[in-house]
Every structure is written in structure tokens, then in C-alpha cells.
Image: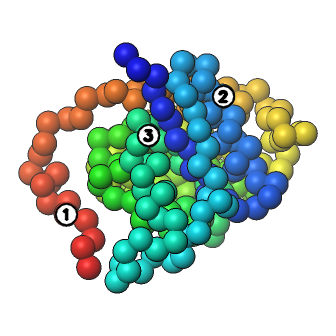
Amino acid sequence: MSETHVLALAGSLREGSYTRLATNRALDGVEAAGGRGELLDLREYDLPALNTDHDGQGDSQRLVDRVGAADAIILGSPMYHGSYSGVLKNALDYCGFDEFEGKTVGLLAVSGGSFPITTLEHLRSVCRALDSWVLPHQAAIPNVHSAFEDGELVDEGIEKRVDTLGRRVVEYADIEPDPATFESGQNEGADD
């Protein structure tokens, strides 16, 4: 069996991003489980706001190709106004069923304050709409500014949860999809 390739997208453009730090920590869990983890840094991509009247905007094809080639995905986002970041939303809008259908996805969210549960719920909804298999295990890091010290997680419980997320993505990357249902044939996506 070949090595599981897990691609992580961190939905923050900030230089000292806690989301990126946490997502990289989840990739350590991927490596510990025998997978190959890779961060797709959205700062390195020219991704204008999606306009479906234009194909191949900016670096969108490069993004789509990399997401499509991965065996599993980790999505990390800061909580912005009770949801996930627009940067991540725009990147996901360029992708579709070809990139996500049947693929295992792990979710991670950080917040400067309370638990980023709605961020995780919104990401879960998007991934389910793309017919991916979203791990039941997810990682939430509240009060993120105090969760890290010198770039390392200082809370053992959170560190374990983030590490477990990376491990679980590898463990369940080859999960077999459920048999098709009537509803699965009704999800056509947005063609307009």
C-alpha cells in the first residue's frame, strides 16, 4: 500500500498565523501515523474571488490539481464572525466534487476567544455538501493566543487532540463510501 498523502489548507494569510501553526501540528500527527503531510499555503496562491464566468482564474487550476491529488484533506480556519475565513471559503469554492467526493476530511478551528464550534459546523456542512467523509473527531482551539508559546502548543490536552486529528485522517483515508442513496443523486452542485 502506498503512503497516504494528506494535504492541509490553512485559511489564514496572517504571517504569524496560529491556524497555520496548529495545522502544521496536525500534520505532525499525519507523519506519526505513517502518512505524508503537506501544507498548502494559500498565501502562495493568486486566487481572486471566484467568478464562474471565467475559467482558470489566477492559480486556481494549480490549487484544484493539488487538492484533487491528495488522498485526504485537513482544513484549518480561524473563527471569523462565527464562521470560517473568506480565504478558505474562496479556495473551497474553486474546488468541487472531483476534488472532495469520497475523500476523508479532518477539521481544525482556532479562536481568540470562545470555542470555534460554529466554524467547525460550517466547514462540516460544506464538506458534506461536496460528498466527502468528514471525521467525527475534530480539533478546536479556543483562546489560541494563550495555547501557544514559542510556536508550540502548551496545553497537552489540545496538543493530543490536534495530533489525533492528523492520525485519524491517515487511519480513515481509505474508508469505503456508503452505498448510494436517493439523496446522493440529488446533489448536483452549483452549475450557475
Residue 188 x %, y %: 19, 63
Which residue is found at the position 62% from the left and 33% from the top? Answer: 27
Residue 153 x %, y %: 79, 35
Cα distance in 3D space between marks 3 and 2 = 17 Å
Residue 106 x %, y %: 49, 40
Please report contact status of discs 1 and 3: CB closer than 8 Å, yes or no. Answer: no
Q: Quadrant of residue 51?
A: bottom left
Kindly give the residue lying farthest to the left in the view shown: 182
Density class for disc 2 (Cα within 10 Å; few <14, some 14-19, many ≥20) is many
Cα distance in 3D space between marks 1 and 3 = 23 Å
Q: Name the N-terminal-most of marks 2 and 1.
A: 2
Residue 182 x %, y %: 9, 51
Q: Name the N-terminal-most of marks 1 and 3.
A: 3
Total numbered labels:
3
Position above or below: 110 against 176: below
Which residue is found at the position 60% from the left and 63% from the top? Answer: 45
Please report contact status of discs 3 and 2: CB closer than 8 Å, yes or no. Answer: no
Q: Which mark is residue 160?
A: none
Q: Quadrant of residue 69?
A: top left
Q: Residue type at mark 2?
A: Asp
Residue beneath label 1, please? 188
Q: Which mark is residue 70?
A: 3
Q: Residue type at mark 3?
A: Ala
Cα distance in 3D space between marks 2 and 1 = 36 Å
Which residue is found at the position 76% from the left and 54% from the top? Answer: 17
In this rendering, the label closer to the viewer, 3 or 2: 3
Density class for disc 3 (Cα within 10 Å; few <14, some 14-19, many ≥20) is many
Q: Residue type at mark 1?
A: Glu
Residue beneath label 2, please? 28
Quadrant occupied by the C terminus: bottom left
